[in-house]
Each structure stands twice: as structure tokens, then as C-alpha cells.
Image (tube, helix red, strand yellow):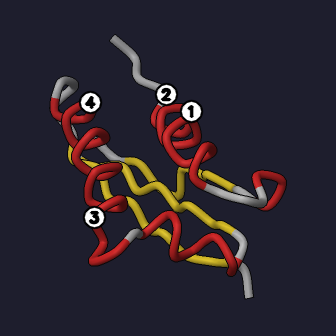
């Protein structure tokens, strides 16, 4: 079962941001055991995506980890802003 992690994370983050035109989700690297996804948002949206105490970012990571574990991989998600 192939999971499109870029689309999964994009679908989770899009409703959170004010500037969806500045949202970029890109697979940075992938090997046999792990996947690295980079999420870039507008500077104004960074707090919305990370959440108070990192709760929203942790929820996004938890959902992604669950999907990745089904195919035997680990996933790393880097959240950053433009500028």
C-alpha cells in the first residue's frame, strides 16, 4: 500500500494556515528505512502550524508516524518558514 506522505501532510496543514499559497510540502529524502519531509509555511503561519507547546506539530507527526509504520518506515517532518 503506497502512501503519498506529501499529500497527507498537505491535507493536514492546509486548513491551519492563513496563506495557503505559501505552503510547500516536499519530500526531502527517502531511503529504505526513513523518509524526510520538509514543510515550509509563511512566517505568519508558523505559530499556527506548530501550535502552543508544539501540540499541533506533534499531532501531525503522530498521524504521519502511524501511516509510515504501516509500511515499515520512519518519518521525519521538518517545519520551517520562508525567510
Nearer the observer: mark 3 or 1; the answer is 3
Percent position of residue 30, x then y: 41, 48
Mark linked to residue 71: none
Q: Residue at x 60, y 43 (%)?
A: 15
Q: CA distance from mark 4 to mark 1?
A: 12 Å
Q: Quadrant of residue 43?
A: bottom right
Rendered-image quadrant of the N terminus: top left
Q: Are marks 3 and 4 in contact (CB under 8 Å)?
A: no
Circle nearer the N terminus (4, 1): 1
- Distance between the alpha carbons at the discs numbered 4 and 2: 10 Å
Q: Residue at x 27, y 77 (%)?
A: 53
Q: Which residue is mark 3?
A: 55
- In this rendering, the count of numbered labels is 4
Task: Give residue 7's mark.
Answer: 1
Residue on which disc 2 sits: 4
Q: Residues within 10 Å of mark 4 (few under 14, many from 20)?
A: some
Q: Are the residues flagged by discs 3 and 1 in contact, CB closer than 8 Å?
A: no
Q: Is residue 19 left or right of residue 16?
A: right
Between 52 and 1, the one lying in front of the other is 52
Q: Is residue 74 left or right of residue 38?
A: left
Q: How far apart are the alpha carbons under marks 2 and 3? A: 23 Å
Amino acid at each position: 500500500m503506497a502512501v503519498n506522505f506529501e499529500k497527507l501532510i498537505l491535507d493536514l496543514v492546509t486548513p491551519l494556515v492563513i496563506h495557503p499559497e505559501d505552503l510547500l510540502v516536499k519530500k526531502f529524502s527517502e531511503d529504505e528505512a526513513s523518509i524526510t519531509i520538509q514543510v515550509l509555511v509563511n512566517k505568519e503561519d508558523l505559530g499556527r502550524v506548530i501550535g502552543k507547546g508544539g501540540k499541533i506539530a506533534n499531532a501531525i507527526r503522530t498521524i504521519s508516524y502511524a501511516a509510515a509504520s504501516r509500511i515499515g518506515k520512519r518519518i521525519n517532518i521538518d517545519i520551517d518558514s520562508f525567510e
